Image (cartoon, helix red, strand yellow):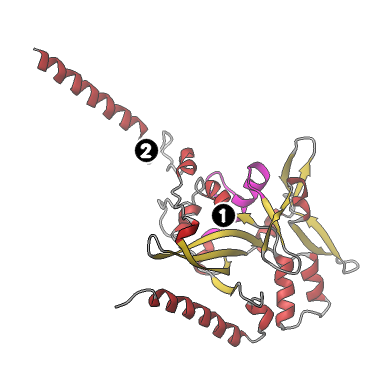
């Protein structure tokens, strides 16, 4: 009789557990028959992170790369231009996190593109960072217009809807600071994005240089244009919780469920090498003007890293 009692209790427990599990499952179509594309809010709090002890890192190299969203593989970062109820592009995710979240923005060093994490840009100063340059047709002079403005009454930043779409269409590159390192504990190479910076090549400095004829095809001119195009740096680890809550717009599969965090963690994007930190503290654009020579140097750095990884092992 007692065994029958325990049997009934066990059956009731499993039935109750099954009901709860069934309640937690998310249906593919909602009550209105619309496909569900919502992310789980708790997802950003359960991001898998591998912690590396400093004593285990015996080699590292810092690389600067450019993610060009005009490349076919990166187009999912660019669209949609204007956010919808379901999707936002990568730039909008960053901007929303800067204006409404706790994401911090940092400046870059003078005459350089490297981040300066000691210089934090306050929210009320972002309107001086994201500036678009429009030419006045009357006197052919540049007019600055900010993408965002800070409302002191509401104590929050707002978008300038008049230039929003034009600004986003011109913002088509990101600068990435990546660290490649060897962990002797796991006996393998890792790569980690340390920081990301949106690039914008249509500010007053760049436009003035181009239109005055001073923009020649020299490494120095391209380098100056690149330096002035760095808007601000954001820490990748601080950005990840916001990336994990937003799905990217599907490309060929309407049921694709890939967040921006997945997109970067799985290296689904394409990037090209801008240079590495070295003794001369000079990237490729500072040293070479020929595209062929720059490409050879890119190949050289990539080959050196590949040889380093292969030489770690004996066959």
In terms of image quadrants, where is residue 166? bottom right
Q: Which mark is residue 27?
A: 2
Q: Is residue 44 magenta?
A: no
Q: Secondary structure at mark 2?
A: loop
Magenta segment range?
76-104
Which residue lies at the image location 10% right of the left edge and 17% below the top edge? Answer: 3
Mark 2 neighbour class, 10 Å CA radius: few under 14, some 14 to 19, many 20 or more: few
Task: Give 219 or 54, whichever is nearer the viewer.
Answer: 54
* Quadrant placement of the N terminus: top left
- Give the answer, above or below, for where 240 lies relative to 69: above
Residue 205 in view in this figure: yes
- Give the answer, above or below, for where 295 lies relative to 174: below
Disc 1 versus disc 2: distance between alpha carbons?
A: 32 Å
Q: Residue placed farthest to the left in the image?
A: 1
Which residue lies at the image location 78% right of the left edge and 70% below the top edge? Answer: 207
- Give the answer, above or below, for where 263 lies relative to 280: above
**Does 294 sit left or right of 139 as displayed?**
left
């Amino acid at each position: 009789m007692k065994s029958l009692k325990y049997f009934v209790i066990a059956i009731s427990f499993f039935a109750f557990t099954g009901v709860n599990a069934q309640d937690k499952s998310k249906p593919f179509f909602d009550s209105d028959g619309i496909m569900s594309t919502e992310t789980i809010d708790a997802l950003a709090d359960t991001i898998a992170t591998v912690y590396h002890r400093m004593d285990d890192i015996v080699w590292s190299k810092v690389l600067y790369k450019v993610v060009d969203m005009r490349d076919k593989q990166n187009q999912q970062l660019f669209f949609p231009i204007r956010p919808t109820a379901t999707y936002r592009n990568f730039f909008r995710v960053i901007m929303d996190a800067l204006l409404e979240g706790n994401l911090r923005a940092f400046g870059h060093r003078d005459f350089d593109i490297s981040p300066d994490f000691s210089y934090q840009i306050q929210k009320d100063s972002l309107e001086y960072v994201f500036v678009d340059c429009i030419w006045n047709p009357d006197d052919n002079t540049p007019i600055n217009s900010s993408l965002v403005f800070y409302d002191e009454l509401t104590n929050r930043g707002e978008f300038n809807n008049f230039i929003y779409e034009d600004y986003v269409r011109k913002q088509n590159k990101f600068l990435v600071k990546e660290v490649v390192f060897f962990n002797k504990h796991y006996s393998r190479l890792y790569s980690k994005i340390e920081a990301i910076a949106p690039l914008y090549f249509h500010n007053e400095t760049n436009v003035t240089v181009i239109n005055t004829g001073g923009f020649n095809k020299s490494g120095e001119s391209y380098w100056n244009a690149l330096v002035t195009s760095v808007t601000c740096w954001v820490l990748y680890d601080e950005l990840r919780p916001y990336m994990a809550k937003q799905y990217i717009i599907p490309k060929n599969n309407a049921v694709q469920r890939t967040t921006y965090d997945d997109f970067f963690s799985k290296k689904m994007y394409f990037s090209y090498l801008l240079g590495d930190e070295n003794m001369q503290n000079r990237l490729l654009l500072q040293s070479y003007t020929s595209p062929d020579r720059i490409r050879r140097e890119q190949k050289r750095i990539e080959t050196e890293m590949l040889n380093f990884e292969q030489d770690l092992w004996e066959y």
